[in-house]
Amino acid sequence: MRIIPTDAITDAVARLFRDANIRLPSDIRAAVDAAIESEPWDDARRTLKTIRENADIAESRGVPICQDTGMACVFIDIGIDAHIDGDVYAAVNDGVARGCAEGYLRASIVRDPLRRENTGDNTPAAVYIDLVPGDKIKITVAPKGFGSENMSRVKMLRPADGVAGLVDFVVSTVESAGGSACPPVVVGVGVGGSFDKAALLAKRALLRGLDEPNPDPYYARLERELLEKINALGIGPMGFGGATTALGVSILSMPTHIAGLPAAVNISCHVTRHLSEVL
């Protein structure tokens, strides 16, 4: 049994939350660079270059890429042979609060959804814990902005809707979002499970690098089809028109009930932040 001190978790989360808000992941940056080269619309290409310049300035000056520094979504994979010597949730929230202060990040979390009192330090985080083999802990921080989060959807499709119904749901969700989600977007799709599981799958799908093809050839083809259909919408970067409405589509699936076809779309803006560390 390997002991993991909570201080190590706090330190990692603080570092990850701060750094994720300052530097674009390499896969997102590479996708923006590729889009600049392939985008045929002049205005869209100029907008993409501005997006890249903004990211460059943020990294060089050590300031947030966007004023919406996001809700702290923290995914923790805990090895079954690892033991945490305290309260993992408190450790995560201490890390988020510290990262928020050190990075001068905007406080964006309210204590109650209706009474709207700001907590002042971006806590509490949304924490998702899974048990995995081994004696290590993998922490992934994914600060999620709500301009794009608000455009996300869950739908209980019927089994008879099939793949055509799923494609229509995903594409129509992105179309309805238009420029409000700060495109070019990354589209996370969850299929299967139950009402709640589909939404979590869609959010987890956003953690997969755009340079990592879906391991299932069936879903890899479906991701390419969806990306093509979404980019054919012509919404373009920041909604100004163009051939780059999305940088990528990522699908996660799981078994479901014979009577259902739950589906979820979690839209993320061009600042799709995710950063991991293994303890």
Image (cartoon, rainbow, N blue to C red):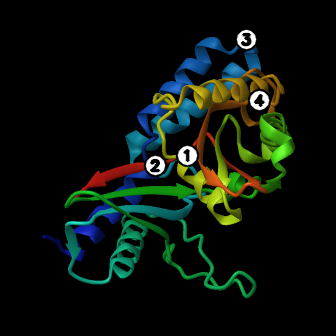
Instruction: Work out whether mark 4 precedes mark 1 in sequence or the reverse, and give the earlier one.
Output: 1
Residue 140: percent from the left, percent from the top?
A: 39, 55
**Residue 113 against residue 239 in the figure, above or below:** below
**Residue 278 against residue 79 in the figure, above or below:** above
> Which residue is identified by label 3?
40
What amino acid is found at the position of numbered circle 3 in the picture?
Answer: Pro
What amino acid is found at the position of numbered circle 1 in the picture?
Answer: Leu
Q: Residue lying at the far front in this picture: please name it.
A: 258
Relative to 211, 246 lies left or right = right
Residue 6: percent from the left, percent from the top?
A: 24, 76
Label 4: few (<14), some (14–19) or many (≥20) C-alpha neighbours in 10 Å: many
Closer to the observer: label 3 or label 2? 2
**Residue visible at 55% across and 18% down in the picture:** 34
Closer to the observer: label 4 or label 2? 4
Q: CA distance from mark 3 to mark 2?
A: 29 Å
Question: Quadrant location of residue 51?
Answer: top right
**Residue visible at 56% across and 60% down in the picture:** 70
What amino acid is found at the position of numbered circle 2 in the picture?
Answer: His
What amino acid is found at the position of numbered circle 4 in the picture?
Answer: Ile
> Which residue is identified by label 1?
206
Q: CA distance from mark 3 to mark 1?
A: 27 Å
Instruction: Work out whether mark 3 precedes mark 2 in sequence or the reverse, and give the earlier one.
Output: 3
**Closer-to-camera residue (63/276):** 276
Q: CA distance from mark 4 to mark 2?
A: 23 Å
> Which residue is identified by label 4?
230
Q: Are marks 1 and 2 in contact (CB under 8 Å)?
A: yes
**Closer-to-camera residue (184/3):** 3
Q: CA distance from mark 3 to mark 4?
A: 16 Å
For residue 178, say whether it is visible.
no
Q: Are marks 3 and 4 in contact (CB under 8 Å)?
A: no
> Which residue is identified by label 2?
274
Instruction: Work out whether mark 4 precedes mark 2 in sequence or the reverse, and give the earlier one.
Output: 4
